[in-house]
Amino acid sequence: MNYDLLLLPSGAATIADVDEYLSTQQGRTETETVATIAAELNKRNSELPAADTFLGTESVGGAPSGAVLHVSSPYDAIGFVRNLLFELATPRGYALYDPQLAWLVDPAGRVEVAVTHGGAGEFPYLTESLLAQWIPELADPAPFLIAERAPEHYIQTYRLDDGYVVEYRDGSAKRHFRLDTADPAEVAALIWAWATETPRPADWTRVKL
């Protein structure tokens, strides 16, 4: 059984928009952008020993799906393939859709920070809409999210049974702060304010480490 990811042009606002767009592309000739991305994926996959290949099919691309590219991979290659798709697709203005999680990762309005999602791994950017979806969905066994701009410059949250702990570090242990809140919208807003370097009043308490 494979894990499916889809690439489509940036611009869909909701999953319903994605579904509608996918339906409009059925039967259409593959676009040049899709063909280029598919060719690079196939090339990199073919360069590996059979035991290390990352595609769940012999090749990708060549389907009558217009501006959409369907990529499947073995479960143990999900993180690698997703990062590779970000590398190839984001500079071309393409979003990534994960139908298993119903996640649309669209580069529009992004802030490029290193993100670690406890349940899903690493991502190269944040958007306000991703935070609004991710924070309420954080769940065991790893209910945390970290965004890092540089070493010792990060913000993180961990979901507890009764709310969230949010911490940020601004360069050193002397600049490490924390607050607790039960409101996921506040957590998302605080992380986005940090990511965009927009001052936001909050009741931070210095953490003594």
Image (tube, helix red, strand yellow):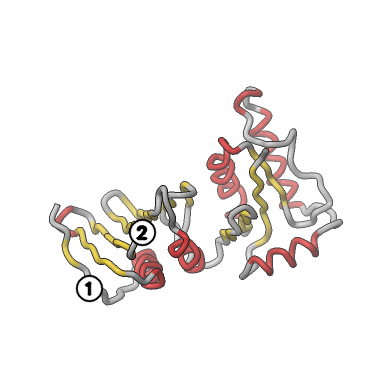
| Classed neighbour count for the residue bearing mark 2: other residues with Cα under 10 Å, few (<14), some (14–19), many (≥20) | many
Q: Which residue is mark 2?
A: 159
Q: Amino acid at mark 1?
A: Asp
Indicate the quadrant where residue 55 lies. top right
Kindly report which numbered mark, 2 or 1, lies closer to the viewer in this rendering. 2
Residue nearest the viewer, comparing 61 with 178: 178
Q: Secondary structure at mark 1?
A: loop
Image height check: is 197 above or below 33? below
Q: Position of residue 73 (x, y in %)?
A: 64, 39
* Disc on the earlier residue, 2 or 1: 2
Q: Amino acid at mark 2?
A: Arg
Label of residue 13 in the image: none
Residue nearest the viewer, comparing 99 with 147: 99
Residue depicted at x 27% and y 60%? 167
Q: Which residue is mark 1?
A: 203
Q: Secondary structure at mark 2?
A: strand
